[in-house]
Structure formats: structure tokens, C-alpha cells
Image (cartoon, rainbow, N blue to C red):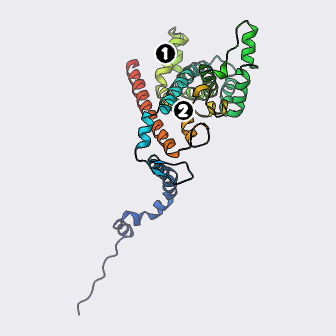
Amino acid sequence: MPRRTARPAVPTTRRRADQPALRRYWREYLAISPFYVLFAVFGLFPLVFALYLSTVSWDGLGEPDQVGLDQFTRLVSSGEFLDALGNTVIIFLIAQVPVILAALGAAALLSSPRLKGRGIYQTLFFLPQVTSIVAVAIVFQSLFSNEFGIINTLLEAVGLGAVPWMTTAWGVRLVVALMIFWRGFGYFVVIFLAGIASIPPTLYEAARLDGAGPWRILRSITVPMIWPTVLFVAVTGTISGFQIFTEPQVLTNGLGGPDGSVVTLMFLQVGYMGTTLPTVAPDLGFATTIGWGVFVVLVLLALFNSRVINGRRKEMS
């Protein structure tokens, strides 16, 4: 009888390499699975459900009515969305653009080595960011009240007439813009300070030895060196500026101001969810469609900001 020879043992690592990837790395996949499960539940599912809601008309209680693309047609043809977009742009230009520029200048001043008590200034500037928006709204209502406001009292004391801040469209827009400026100033200052801290001090020392002044240093050294930070602030500031909701909602008690002058895009969307704007009937389908419209606007603005700022950076370099 022929003698059988023993087959050589296959190394464990080779046997594992011959197995399918899922079988080989099931422990690793199991370890990272919670992230993907949570992402599917709280990320993908709401996105898919939002697509479904944009094709129905539903008040949240009865049966949804399938309307197809009628909600998107209503979005582009209805004056509500365009009016809210106009209000948002106006408030954004009044508040968000000046606050970014002012924060950049304040950060440049706070980064000066000659400034004493820098930590106190940083704390004071950032304090409004952590203050309750309801308390801020009460303070601003007291300041700009038509009859008993402190601002009107001061204006009358110096011989100027009282301004109807809360009963005119531009008056209430200006008050909302001031609230946004006051709350967002400290946040942008902190972001710019973090960017300025990464600039080598030797650049400033060399510039001062060459006789450069503060404005020249800001324009030729600080801004070019923190350009990625400027891009980040511009994009995030634009996104937050077009998502204004809390300030006008709290200041006007959910009514949107005279003639809907501070009904922003997010204000309108939440209004169709049935929580604000008692003059409109709840429609979760149209509210979701407004959200898609806001998404498209923000993407276009982000691309525009990136293109303009990167083009400006090439010119400066």
C-alpha cells in the first residue's frame, strides 16, 4: 500500500487572506458600525423623508395628499419665498457683512503685543454669544420701544424726534440686524484671533522695522496670512446669515414684524410647520420645499464666496 504523505499546514494568515473581506474583518466592521447606524437613522433617513415630504401636501395630522412637483412650482411662483429671500438678504447685508469686517479689525487690535488686559476684552466680546436670546430680545425691546425706549428718550433729550423702531419695516430690520451684530461679533473675533496667532511674530517685527504702519501691516501681512480663516468665516457667516430665525422670531413675538418685514427664509419655513405665523396654514410639504430652496441658495452662495475670495487671494499673491 502506498504511503500517504501529510499535507503541509497552511499558515493562519494565509487562510485568513483567502477569506472574504467581510468575514476577515467582521470585528473591525462591528466596531465602527454604530457610526453608520446613527448616520443612517439621523442622516440618510431624514434626507429621504424630506424628499418624500416635498411631493405631498400635509398638515401633519390627516392623510398626505400627493401633489408631485407642485410644491416646487409653488416655491418659485409664490411671492412668499421671494419676499422672505429679500428680507433675509437685506438683514444679512445690514448685519452679517459689517460684523465680519468689524471682527477682523477688532482681532487685529487685540493681537497687538502692546495691549493690556487682552483676556478681559476677549471675554467681554464673547459673552453675548453665550447669553440667552430671550434675555437679549427683552433688552433690545426695552432699548428700542417706540414710547418708553431708552434710545428714543435719548433722541428726544437732544432735540431729535422719536423713531418708530418697532412699527416700521426698516426700523425693526435695523433692530434685528443690531441683535445679530451684537451676538455674532465675539464669535468671529475669536476665530480671527486663532488665525492671527498662527502668524510668526518675526513678520510683524520686520514690518515695523521697515516703518510699516498698522493699516499696512493688516493689509499686507495679517489678511494674506489668514486667508483660509477669512474664507472659513465668509462661508460660515453667509450660511448663518441666511439661517436667521431666532432674533426676528423672539423680537416680534412670532408675528414677523410690520408687513412681514423680518420674515426670513427660516422664519417662513418654521411658520409653515405650524409653530409661528398664525396667518398661514400648516403645510409640512411646502415647509420642506422651502428647506430645499434654502439649501440651493446656500450652496450657490458658498460657491460664489469661495470663487471670489480665492480669486482675490491670487491677485494679492
Q: Residue at x 52, y 33 (%)?
A: 265
Percent position (x, y) of residue 293?
45, 37
- What residue occupies the far top of the structure in this picture? 159
Q: Which residue is mark 1?
A: 219
Q: Residue at x 64, y 26 (%)?
A: 179
Horizontal relation, residue 255 to residue 201: left or right: right
The mark nearer the N terminus, 1 or 2, is 1
Q: Alpha-carbon neighbours of circle 2 within 10 Å: few (<14), some, or many (≥20)?
A: some
Q: Amino acid at mark 1?
A: Arg
Percent position (x, y) of residue 261?
57, 26
Percent position (x, y) of residue 29?
46, 60
- What residue occupies the far left of the structure in this picture? 2
Percent position (x, y) of residue 32?
49, 57
| Residue 214 quadrant | top right
Q: Which residue is mark 2?
A: 240
Disc 1/disc 2 C-alpha distance (Å) = 26 Å
Give the structural element (helix, strand or loop) at label 1.
helix
- What residue occupies the far bottom of the structure in this picture? 1
1 vs 2, front mark: 2
Q: Is residue 114 above or below residue 294?
A: above
Q: Is residue 188 visible?
A: no
